[in-house]
Image (cartoon, grey):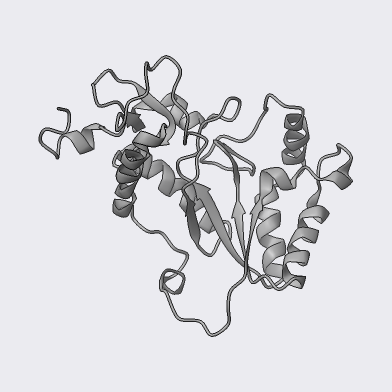
Amino acid sequence: MTNNNRRGFLRHAAVLGALPVVAADAATATATQKIKQDYVMLVWLAHSMFHPASKGRPADEAFIADIMAKCANHGFTTVYIQPRYVGKAVYHSKVVAAFDSMYTAEGPTLTEALRRFDPYDVAVREAKRCGLKVMAQISIFDLWFPGLEDRFYEKNPQYLMVDRKGQRLYYQGVPCYAEKGAQDYCLAEIRELLERGAEGIAFEMDSHQMGWWPPGFGSPEADSFGFNPPWSKNFSGVMA
């Protein structure tokens, strides 16, 4: 997106308020004042699988265990685990298509690691063994990049943000969460991550699509996308 239409992007992102909240338990969803400060660490599993000490070899379970032990030793209390590499899962998901390949030399390394073990399950297990709270972090608007496309939205582009002119142009990687299909897909991923040990879910708003304009869509125009049927049917004149 261009700088001029980021305002519109954030306006439509507000539809997330309608998305049902799923938590592992009521206590997780209740905000309470804490005397002790929480210190958090984001663990991006995809990049954790590539480390200088590996010398090109896939990371193993011991390496992830070492990451969690270091987090605990340095005083962190919570780890946020990001189980996707843009649009692909870096764990054995039944909901999100698994990472299979990429256009860089890193691809085979991660693919080989996924054949041998489940990085997310190991990360959750080792984090809890070290006394760390586990949150799963989902990037809800970062679902497309060459070689890392989310397969669900490739097959169902109608759930992506659609253009205001009704030409059925879809903004790659940016779902419209007013769409029931997008809600159901997101909630299925959330439930899977909670069932596999996360104590809560964090939504990450960053995206490769910020500052990007889809090829073949003509000149960038402000507020061009996000006019999906659930929106346009409820607001008169929205397509004008």
User: Which residue: 81% across, 45% down?
Assistant: 51
Q: Quadrant of residue 23?
A: bottom left
Along the horizontal axis of the image, is 188 left or right of 46? left
Front residue of 167 and 185 = 167
> Where residue 228 sits in the image (x, y, percent)?
26, 32
Image location of residue 4, percent across then percent down: 36, 35
Farthest front residue in view: 4
Eyeballing the image, is 16 above or below 108? Answer: below
Instruction: Residue at 60% x, 63% y: name it.
Output: 134
* Residue 161 seen: yes
Q: Residue at x 33, y 55 (%)?
A: 20
Q: Quadrant of residue 106?
A: top right
Q: Is residue 35 left or right of residue 1?
A: right
Q: Is residue 63 above or below residue 68?
A: above
Q: Residue 189: percent from the left, percent from the top?
A: 48, 47
Q: Quadrant of the N terminus?
A: top left
